[in-house]
Amino acid sequence: MITCSNKDLRSGQKRCSARILLFAGLLLVSVAALAVDSREAIQKAVNLVQEGRLKEADEQAHLALSDPDTRAAACSVLGTIRLQQKRFAESVTFFQEAIRLEPRLMGARLSLADVYTVQGKPQLAIGLYQQILDLDPSNINARLALARSESEMGNYQRSLDLAAPILTSLKQTPEGICALAADFVGIGDHASLAALAKDWAGLSNPPQAWSIKFAVLLARGGAIDEATELLEHVQQIGPPSYELAFNLAGVYLLKKDPARALEYYDQAIGLKPESIPALKQAAAVAEGQGEFERALSYWIRAKKVAPENPEILLGFGRVCLEMDLLDDAEPALEKAAKKRPMDAAYQYTLASAKVGKKQFDVAQSILEGLLKKQPQDSHLQYALGSVLYLEGHLADAATHLRESVRLQPDQLASYYYLALVARDQGDEADAIHRLEDLLRRYPDHAPSCEVLGGLLMTAQRYPEAESNLERAVRLNPKSVKANYQLGLLLARMGKKVEADKRLEIAKSLRTEDEAHSRLQLRLLDPDQ
């Protein structure tokens, strides 16, 4: 997941202190013929605001407030001071008075729009920007603000139309380029989006936060190589930051490079050890790569930070299942399921744990409840069928497994369990036929090779049995049952030396519940 902090990027308060420079020149022209003391007071107030000396600036602005010729300018300065002091109501009053006295004070109108933005009154701000544009069509700030507003409402082409007269100016600022990038992403213009990367390269030392924001927009619009190049450049020139590392990880995920993604997630976690988003993302990537121990380490750290978070409990429990850590998985998944009782994924994973713990009746109850709500879910039909098979309810198991196949013919495990049902019902010929058909489509399914080899051995079709059992061992060398059956078969075929060797391997592999436990964990995965 790619994210970007926009903190302070659009703050009306920070922009206002810069905009005082914009209208300061206008003010100086308008007060050129005033009395020297009022004019000097306004100049001093403007300078003091720029220096952040608000109390002294306030005193100077009040000196000019009583003079009718400088009152509008003084109100504008006082409005700016109140905005920086976060005294928003007073700021509005001063700016409104300044505009009433002098309607063409563009700086006051812009600053008042900033106050409305800070107050969460976007429509009032938009109205002001439109007024400014009516008075001065070349005003960049107002035009950009209106374009951004249209973009946020999804009117991307309208936003670009508004921006067209100031396109050259926009491409010279980080904010302008990002505004254009958002529009190009919105209309799907990937070529124009990627071309903005060249404009960005021409900027002089843009702030890191803006570079990250632009890279995120590039990535979202499909310009992943450009996004990666930009972020790697920012990484090289420093300084390191959590946001930079997190987003670099995100773009490498989009590039389908999980190893580099994990490298940057680790860097992000090092900079911000208690970051739940980074820990969750890293765990998911590691889990997807089959690095379960690594994934578990991320989930454990996340669990220490947020022990009651249901998503973290689910992830932790799921990886524990994969690692046969059933005693750790079960309580975490039970807690997660209680917190999300209506979420099928949570209940389903808990059912998997119950199967692993051989609590088949509990797993059956959970799955039946889910199936009542989603009877057309082939995955749930399969899961319930597999549990019923484990409980020995062969006819009921077959019913649900056949329904799973009807709903989703392109799967594996339901066919496998239907073959097991046929075998256990005494129809070995049907079981052999089903397994041979399955292996034609999925030749590397080790459990099917193993079962078929055993059935063919019983049917005295020894060469075929040997071929399937050897394939089963090759696909899963640690299978006790496959090695044992192959040893028995070799003995029947008179290959005593080979048989003894294979049986010795089976004996060395046999540990308490080794084969059965791992099989149980796969029962609820129809793709295995």
Image (spheres, grey):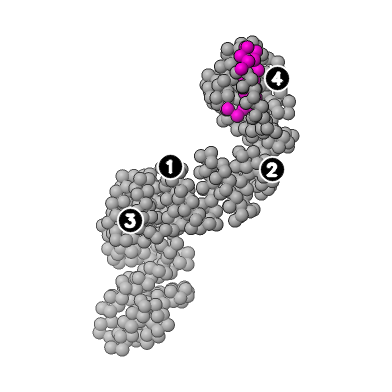
Q: CA distance from mark 4 to mark 1?
A: 45 Å
Please state the extent of the stretch shown in magenta in the rendering.
476-497
The residue at which mark 2 appears reads as: 327
Q: Mark 3 or mark 4: which is in front?
A: 4
Q: Mark 4 or mark 1: which is in front?
A: 1
Question: How busy is the neighbourhood of tag 3: few (under 14 within 10 Å), some, or many (20 plus)?
Answer: many
Q: Which mark is residue 257?
A: 1
Q: Amino acid at mark 2?
A: Asp
Q: CA distance from mark 2 to mark 4?
A: 31 Å
Marks 4 and 1, the one that precedes in the sequence: 1
Q: Is residue 81 above or below residue 405?
A: below
Q: Which mark is residue 177?
A: 3
Marks 1 and 2, the one that precedes in the sequence: 1
Q: Amino acid at mark 4?
A: Asp
Does dot 4 land on a helix, a strand or a loop?
helix
Marks 3 and 4, the one that precedes in the sequence: 3
Question: Is the Cβ of the residue at disc 1 closer than 8 Å to that at disc 3?
Answer: no
Query: Residue at image x 62%, y 42%?
Result: 320
Q: Is residue 351 visible?
A: no
Q: CA distance from mark 1 to mark 3?
A: 28 Å
- Quadrant position of residue 76: bottom left
Q: Amino acid at mark 1?
A: Asp
Does dot 2 land on a helix, a strand or a loop?
helix
Marks 1 and 3, the one that precedes in the sequence: 3
Is 204 in front, or is 405?
Answer: 204
Marks 3 and 2, the one that precedes in the sequence: 3
Q: Amino acid at mark 3?
A: Ile
* 2 in magenta: no
The residue at which mark 4 appears reads as: 424
